[in-house]
Image (tube, rainbow, N blue to C red):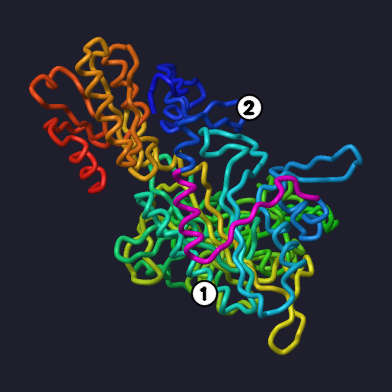
């Protein structure tokens, strides 16, 4: 491709709202063009990179046995109502009516649509398993679209959906998709981690995320420094904590603790580690409008030096039947209204005082003794508390893992890393097939719901993910499989006929060798051409300049800007060998 003939609108100006380098470089490099809030057009370079990434994804999915389809972007709202997600998904789901007042949604994900396909055509276990995928536009009405393609409203996703006769076969496909995703991200030459994750609005019994490591990542990952364990912070687990040696030995008693209404004051008052104190975090549960359930306060007890993980907390109350949509902050007025004293709220008689339906204790507190906790009476605390004496307590993992906590699998130390989610795989089970009536006849002739899995990759998000991990201050650095061009040929002086003639000769030779090459034939200063090379990020630049008279040219590696002098003799053969080797 000739630079002079290609539409590459590079610019020196950095958009004011572009905070991340990926956002800045994709716009400045002429890859994308913003047309609305969180909505971008892909220009020729952007489409080229997108196609290269898509080709890798498509190849590996096809190799795994998945089959490509294409479903409608516009989905009847009735399907989402049947599945129960119409309300639960929240305001990110864009709803609208057509001229006949029929309700529709713009698909943010397509579980309902693909289940309708399975429902229509899969009737027997003999037709299973089936894995159907698409690479298609999605829309989520983000409240605050930001960071360019990283968190836009309209995006392209690869979403696959598998159907199975039993749970064992679903587990097999889940493992196969995990390996397939590893191949995709390894082929793209990315540094990534596979992490345990929360299933969120998609639902199901298990999920894993694929995180590209980058300092700008919005997700915090807990990783073990000794084994391969990694998890999104929302799902991270830890080993049971070691007890500090200075535990407070005391028989059960009530102490007067005037104005001791924080964990810090409490531990100082009793001269003990916050580990031995008990605190409550109160949140307000919000329910689906169709449930006709009023908002209510819910209570989470954990050690004084631990922090509540809100997603775990929501999952914990939903596990015992709450079916809450979200947890929000509870006001002091709301807490006082149920008869409690802020700063002095403990587990004793809490259910009798508040008529609470949901009281959860962190799993690390199970059967714990020697605790200090508020007495539900202003200026009083209990000491010598033994939770083993309580009846009917509900224990769940609700604590946010901290750096320095121990790995639940090997005992290694956990630390935080930042990551960009680029893939997510789920075991959905019968969640959607049961709701939408997608059944099949098993080997015994029984009519049962299909087992289902789903597997997503944020295709457009991969562009900024690559750049955030690889780029420098000058511009884009792509991995070799994703780069828009393998090599840019830069003519130092277009008025030098020898340079122009030789550049064109090399250009034709590389094209005949199926090398993706850009010839910068523009009549511009050499410095401008080099700046554009560094901004756009072809894998290499071949500089044809004054050294041509000595039979030499210069090759620059965009990744590290290292320079290498090459002989003009058999140049195209040398370049092909270098590109294939890399």
- Residue 127's tag is none
Please name the residue that numbered disc 2 is placed on.
36
Res. 280 visible in picture: no
Q: Hey, which quadrant is residue 309 in on the image?
A: bottom right
Please name the residue that numbered disc 1 is placed on.
172
Task: Give coordinates of residue 156: x percent, y percent.
Answer: 58, 44
Nearer the observer, 328 or 189: 189
Q: Hey, which quadrant is residue 20 in on the image?
A: top left
Label 1, label 2: how many angstroms apart (C-alpha)? 42 Å
In this picture, residue 439 sits left or right of residue 425: right
Q: Which residues are magenta?
A: 52-76
Res. 507 visible in picture: yes
Q: Earlier in the sequence, mark 1 or mark 2?
A: 2
Residue 363 is one of the magenta-drawn residues: no
Which residue is rendered at x = 74% and y = 81% of the image? 441
Query: Quick one: SS at disc 1?
Result: helix
Residue 58 is one of the magenta-drawn residues: yes
Which residue is rendered at x = 65% and y = 55% of the image? 201
Task: Give coordinates of residue 453: x percent, y percent.
Answer: 60, 66
**Quadrant assignment for the N terminus:** top left
Nearer the observer, 46 or 85: 46
**Could you tell me how many numbered marks the image carries?**
2
Q: Is residue 493 above or below residue 191?
A: above
Crowdedness of circle 2 by 10 Å Cα count: few (<14), some, many (20+)?
few
Q: Hey, which quadrant is residue 217 in on the image?
A: top left
Task: Give coordinates of residue 188: x percent, y percent.
Answer: 38, 49
Crowdedness of circle 1 by 10 Å Cα count: few (<14), some, many (20+)?
few
Furthest-left residue in view? 550
In this picture, residue 552 sits left or right of residue 509: left
Q: Is residue 375 above or below residue 326?
A: below
Task: Give coordinates of residue 398: x percent, y percent.
Answer: 55, 62
């Amino acid at each position: 491709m000739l630079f002079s003939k290609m539409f590459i609108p590079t610019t020196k100006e950095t958009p004011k709202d572009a905070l991340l380098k990926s956002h800045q470089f994709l716009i400045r490099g002429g890859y994308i063009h913003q047309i609305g809030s969180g909505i971008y057009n892909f220009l020729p370079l952007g489409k080229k990179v997108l196609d290269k990434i898509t080709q890798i994804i498509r190849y590996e999915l096809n190799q795994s046995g998945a089959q490509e389809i294409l479903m409608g972007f516009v989905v009847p709202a009735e399907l989402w109502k049947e599945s129960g997600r119409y309300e639960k998904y929240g305001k990110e789901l864009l709803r609208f009516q057509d001229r006949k007042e029929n309700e529709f949604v713009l698909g943010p994900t397509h579980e309902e649509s693909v289940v309708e396909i399975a429902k229509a055509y899969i009737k027997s276990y003999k037709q299973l398993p089936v894995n159907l995928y698409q690479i298609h536009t999605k829309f989520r009405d983000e409240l605050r679209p930001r960071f360019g393609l990283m968190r836009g409203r309209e995006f392209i996703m690869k979403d696959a959906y598998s159907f199975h006769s039993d749970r064992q076969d679903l587990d097999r496909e889940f493992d196969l998709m995990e390996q397939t995703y590893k191949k995709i991200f390894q082929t793209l030459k990315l540094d990534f981690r596979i992490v345990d994750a929360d299933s969120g609005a998609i639902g199901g019994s298990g999920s894993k995320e694929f995180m590209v490591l980058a300092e700008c990542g919005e997700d915090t990952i807990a990783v073990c420094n000794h084994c391969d364990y990694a998890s999104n912070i929302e799902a991270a687990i830890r080993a049971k904590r070691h007890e500090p040696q200075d535990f407070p030995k005391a028989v059960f008693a009530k102490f007067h603790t005037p104005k001791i209404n924080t964990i810090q004051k409490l531990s100082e008052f009793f001269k003990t580690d916050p580990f031995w104190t008990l605190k409550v975090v109160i949140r307000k549960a919000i329910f689906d409008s169709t449930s006709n359930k009023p908002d209510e306060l819910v209570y989470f007890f954990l050690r004084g030096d631990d922090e509540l993980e809100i997603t775990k907390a929501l999952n914990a109350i939903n596990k015992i039947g709450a079916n809450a949509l979200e947890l929000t902050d509870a006001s002091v007025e709301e807490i006082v209204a149920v008869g409690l004293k802020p700063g002095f709220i403990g587990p004793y008689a809490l259910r009798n005082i508040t008529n609470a339906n949901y009281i959860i204790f962190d799993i690390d507190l199970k059967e714990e003794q020697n605790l200090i906790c508020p007495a539900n009476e202003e200026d009083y605390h209990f000491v010598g508390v033994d939770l083993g004496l309580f009846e009917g307590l509900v224990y769940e993992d609700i604590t946010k893992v901290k750096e320095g906590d121990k790995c639940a699998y090997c005992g290694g130390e956990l630390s935080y890393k930042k990551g960009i989610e680029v893939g997510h795989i789920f075991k959905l089970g019968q969640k959607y097939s049961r709701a939408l009536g997608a059944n099949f006849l098993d080997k015994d002739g029984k009519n049962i719901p299909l087992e289902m899995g789903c597997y997503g990759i944020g295709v457009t998000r991969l562009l900024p993910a690559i750049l955030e991990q690889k780029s420098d201050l000058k511009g884009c650095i792509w991995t070799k499989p994703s780069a828009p061009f393998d090599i840019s040929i830069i003519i130092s002086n277009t008025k030098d006929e020898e340079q122009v003639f030789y550049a064109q000769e090399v250009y034709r030779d590389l094209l005949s060798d199926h090398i993706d090459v850009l010839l910068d034939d523009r009549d511009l200063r050499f410095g401008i051409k080099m700046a554009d090379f560094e901004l756009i990020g072809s894998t290499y630049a071949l500089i044809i300049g004054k050294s041509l008279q000595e039979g030499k040219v210069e090759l620059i590696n965009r990744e590290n800007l290292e320079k290498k002098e090459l002989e003009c003799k058999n140049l195209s053969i040398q370049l092909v060998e270098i590109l294939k080797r890399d």
